[in-house]
Image (spheres, grey):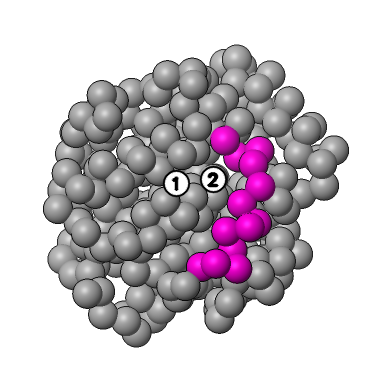
Amino acid sequence: MLNKKINGIPVACRLKGEGPPLVLLHGFTQDSRVWKPQLDSLSNEFTLIAWDAPGAGRSADPPGTFTINDWADSLAGLLDSIGVKQAHILGLSWGGILAQVFYKHYPQSVFSLILADTYAGWRGSLPEPVTEERLAGCLRDASLPPGEFVPKYLPGMFSDSVTKKVREYLANIMSDFHPAGFRLMAMSSAIDTFSILPSIEVPVLLIWGEQDKRSPITIADQLHTAIPGSKLEIISGAGHISSLEKPVEFNKNVSDFCLAFNVK
């Protein structure tokens, strides 16, 4: 693990492999460990950069005023600190929302976007009552002990046929969630990024689990329609964390997409 101080906040990051830079942005109940299948299998083709976002994993909690724009600035600072000027940006769930905002503020740093099982922000993709209910629940549940938090959120992360091994692996990661970070990430998810989508001018790949319960296929179609020239790949039998449930299919989609381009 690399440890950097970015804008005054200690940030941890896993760096592995050689090749074009590929940044991995995790979801809001997770940290960089969720990318193990990608770190293990894609590092022979890419330089993988998987951070623990401030408020997750081994990174410190950000201040209570932190917004999605601040996370974007932190990511820019991290990439600058390790000498990465331009990269493929892969964001899963909350990480996909962050990827969109990062592109808005730092388009010159993005060679392509891979948005997996994500949203145009909750407010951009979900009915308002659903957004309000989801946000209120997250703010309330942030205070739960891990033994209650994990069973409440884990079922929505996979299809019903996920293996016990994969389910337990994610449960272990989720049990280390940061209450403060989770609360802030939930608040930063309840935004509307839909206006960003038509303005994206880099190649975009959308990857979706066919059985995603948290961000259903209808949202994939919404993003696919809104983003000019985007490509959509559906992974059969996968749920919300498709990268962990069906890593072989997920990794092939990522590799085939990214290797079709050359980072400048």
**Image-based side of 39 in relation to 242, left or right:** left
The secondary element bearing badge 2 is classed as: helix
Residue at mark 2: 94
Q: Residue at x 15, y 66 (%)?
A: 18
Rendering coords of residue 180 (x, y %): 50, 20
Q: In front here: 263 or 95?
A: 263
Q: In front here: 21 or 149?
A: 21
Q: Which residues are magenta?
A: 188-200
Quarter of the image that includes the N terminus: top left
Q: Residues within 10 Å of mark 1 (few under 14, many from 20)?
A: many
Q: Residues within 10 Å of mark 2 (few under 14, many from 20)?
A: many
State the residue lying farthest toward the bottom: 260
The secondary element bearing badge 1 is classed as: loop
Rendering coords of residue 60 (x, y %): 33, 23
Q: Amino acid at mark 1?
A: His
Labels 1 and 2 touching (C-beta < 8 A): yes
Rendered image: mark on residue 26: 1
Rendering coords of residue 67 (x, y %): 50, 32
**Image-based side of 206 in relation to 88, left or right:** right
- The image shows residue 248, relative to residue 99, as above or below, that is below
